[in-house]
Image (cartoon, helix red, strand yellow):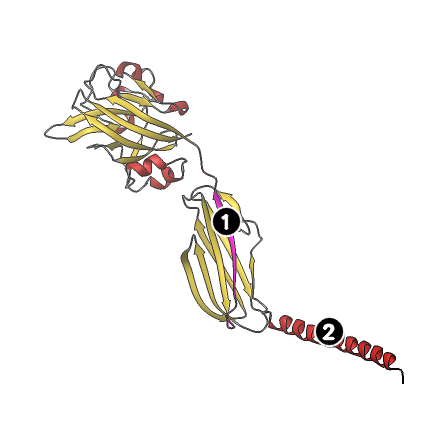
Amino acid sequence: MNINSNRKTMKRFTLLFTIAAAIVVLSVNTGCNKEDEPILPTIKLNQTDGYISGDIEAAYADTLRFGITIDYNGTDNLVKFQLERDSELLVDSTINTTQFIFEYSGLKNVNDKEVWKFITTDFAGNTVTDSVTITGAFGEISAFSSIIVGAQNNTSVPGFASFSNNLVTLYSIADAFNHQADIDLFCFYENTTSHVNLMTLAAPGSNITGIFGGDYDPSNYTTKNVTYFSKTTLTAAEFDAVSNDAVILASFDPNNKFKKAKLLTAGEVYAIKLQSGKYGLLKIAAVTGTEDGTLEFAAKIQK
C-alpha cells in the first residue's frame, strides 16, 4: 500500500469537504439575510401639475399642495401616518388599511428653507419617511438705516418723504406739492383738546386737516397717495435681521391697518403698504420735540 498516495487522497478529501462546508454555511447565511430583510411600505407623491413632488422654490404665502399615496408591503397593514413641517407635527393619524391616500395644502412660511416630512408605520413596526425641501424665493428689499423728517413747524428739516424708484427722497412742504404723485408719507405733531396724536406719520390720502394750512397743504393735492400702517409685534432686533420681503409681507395685517401711525415711540415697528402696492417696515428710532420737532426712523421697502 502506497502511504503517500493515501495521504494525498485524504488531503484532497479534506479540502473538498472544507470547501463544501463553507459553501453550505455561506448559502445558509445568505438565505437568512435575505429572509430577515423587511419589505417596507412605499410612499409616492402625486406627480400631477399643481402638486409638489420634489424640492422646489416658492415665494412667501405660495400654496404648497401635496398628494400622498402609501401602499402596504403586501403583508402588514399601515397603522400610522404623520406629517411634519420643520419638525412640527401637523398631522398624526391612526389608520388600519392596505392603502392610504391623503392630501394637504399649506402656505410657504418666512423661513429660507422648510422641510416637509411624510412618515408611515405598518403593523410590523416598519417606518418609512419621505421628504421635500421648500426653499424661499423671496423678494429683494431696499434698506434705509436713518431717515429724519420734521414736524409741521420745522423749517429746517423736510417733513415729506417718497420711496419711489427704490430711493428715499425728502421734500419740503413746497417741493412736495410739486411732486404729489411721489409723496408716500409726512410727519406732524398734534396734541389738542380734540386730537391727541402726538408725533404721527400719515399720507396725503389720509385726509389730515387743520395741521399745515396754506396753499401747499396736502388737503389741496389733486393726487393723494394712501399709505396704510399696521403696528407689528416685531422687536427692533427682529427688524434689523430682515433681509428679504417675507417677514415684511407676513407682518402686514390687512384687518388691522390704518391711514396714520400715531403716538409714535422709539422701538416700535410698523408694517406699511404704499400706494404703489409695495410693502415695507418702519422702525421708530427717535422722537424729538413737538410741532417743530423731528422723527427718526429706519425703513425696509420691497424693491
- Give the quarter of the figure containing the N terminus: bottom right
Residue at the spot of label 2: 23
Secondary structure mostly seen in the magenta stretch: strand
The residue nearer to you, when weighing 231 against 195, is 231
Q: Is residue 27 above or below residue 243?
A: below
| Position of residue 303 measured from the top left corner of the image (x, y, whole percent) | 42, 29
Secondary structure beneath dot 2 equals: helix
Which one is in front in this view, the residue at disc 1 or the one at disc 2? 2
**In the rendered image, the vertical position of residue 283 relative to residue 173, given as above or below:** below
Return the residue nearer the eye: 42 or 65: 42
Residue 58 screen position, x and y as percent: 48, 43
* Few, some or many residues within 10 Å of mark 1 (<14, 14–19, 20+): some
Q: In x, y percent, where is residue 74?
A: 59, 71
Which residue corresponds to mark 1?
A: 133
Q: Amino acid at mark 1?
A: Thr
Q: Please, what is the three-letter code of the amino acid marked with disc 2?
A: Ile
